[in-house]
Image (cartoon, grey):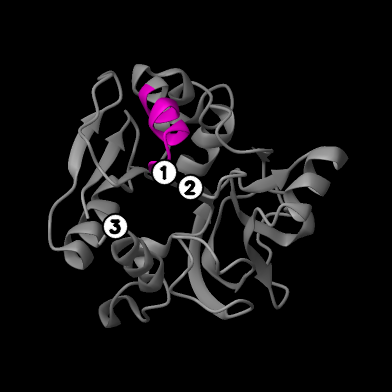
Amino acid sequence: MKTAVVVFPGSNRDRDMIAALTRIGGVPPALVWHKDAEVPAVDLIVIPGGFSYGDYLRSGAIAARSPVMDTVRERAARGVMVLGVCNGFQILTEAGLLPGVLMRNASLKFVCREVRLSVENADTPFTRGYLHGQSIRAPVAHHDGNYFADAETLAAVEANRQVAFRYTDGTNPNGSLNDIAGVFNREKNVLGLMPHPENLIEAAHGGTDGRALFMGLLQQAA
């Protein structure tokens, strides 16, 4: 599987994502600086976590206007898979690639802990490695992960099976509506989620629940 990781000033989870993609796919991803409009031909584009531009204005708002995002939008429209994790999720919503917004956590505090997720739609390239309703673990680390959408948008997201993951067992760390932890676009080739699957892919991490997401993508591209 050919992959690319977009790097913004302030990113601090790009190295984790690079390590995960290299370990699972066997090939290091191409690195694309945010000011570059050129992205190599790949199967998957990843917008990693971090604090792009120091989270000034709204988290992800400045990064969403970087030159590379025009190319990401164009590739997504052509069916290329795009994954945004944490700050990457925020960037994808700000760029109009995913519905809704990510607001300040309801507690107004940075949250860093493990949560439990339910797999809400296992019929996508991103989630084919899981079972519908499967409960998995994942770490989170964010200040602005409170998913919000107006009533009409939220109803459409639910009806179109665009919810990828929900927080379960009372572990919602941020106040997200309907316990939403991750959403797809309508076509299901773009996924944004607040938890970090790349940080739970091997025994040294304390578990492998995040590995199936990457393995599913690898099988899809084979």
Circles 1 and 2: CB distance less than 8 Å?
yes
In the rendered structure, which disc, 2 or 3, sits on the residue that comes first in sequence? 2
* Residue under the point 68% across and 54% down: 174
In the rendered structure, which disc, 3 or 1, sits on the residue that comes first in sequence? 1
Q: Position of residue 199 (x, y in %)?
A: 36, 65
Residue 4: mark in rendering: none
Q: Residues within 10 Å of mark 3 (few under 14, many from 20)?
A: some
* Residue under the point 65% across and 61% down: 173
In the image, residue 131 above or below residue 80 = below
- State the residue in front, 82 or 9: 82
Report the residue marked by disc 1: 82
Outermost residue, left side = 27
- Under mark 2, the amino acid is Asn
User: What is the C-alpha distance between the residues marked 2 and 3?
Assistant: 12 Å
Q: Is residue 153 magenta?
A: no
In the image, residue 148 above or below residue 220 = above
Outermost residue, right side = 151
Q: Residues within 10 Å of mark 1 (few under 14, many from 20)?
A: many
In the image, residue 195 above or below residue 216 = above
Report the residue marked by disc 3: 221
Q: Position of residue 143 (x, y in %)?
A: 58, 46
Q: Position of residue 155 (x, y in %)?
A: 83, 48
User: What is the C-alpha distance between the residues marked 1 and 2?
Assistant: 6 Å
Magenta region, residue range: 71-80
Residue 44 placement, left or right of 144: left
Report the residue marked by disc 2: 189
**Quick one: SS at disc 2?**
loop
Quadrant containing the C terminus is bottom left
Q: Residues within 10 Å of mark 2 (few under 14, many from 20)?
A: some
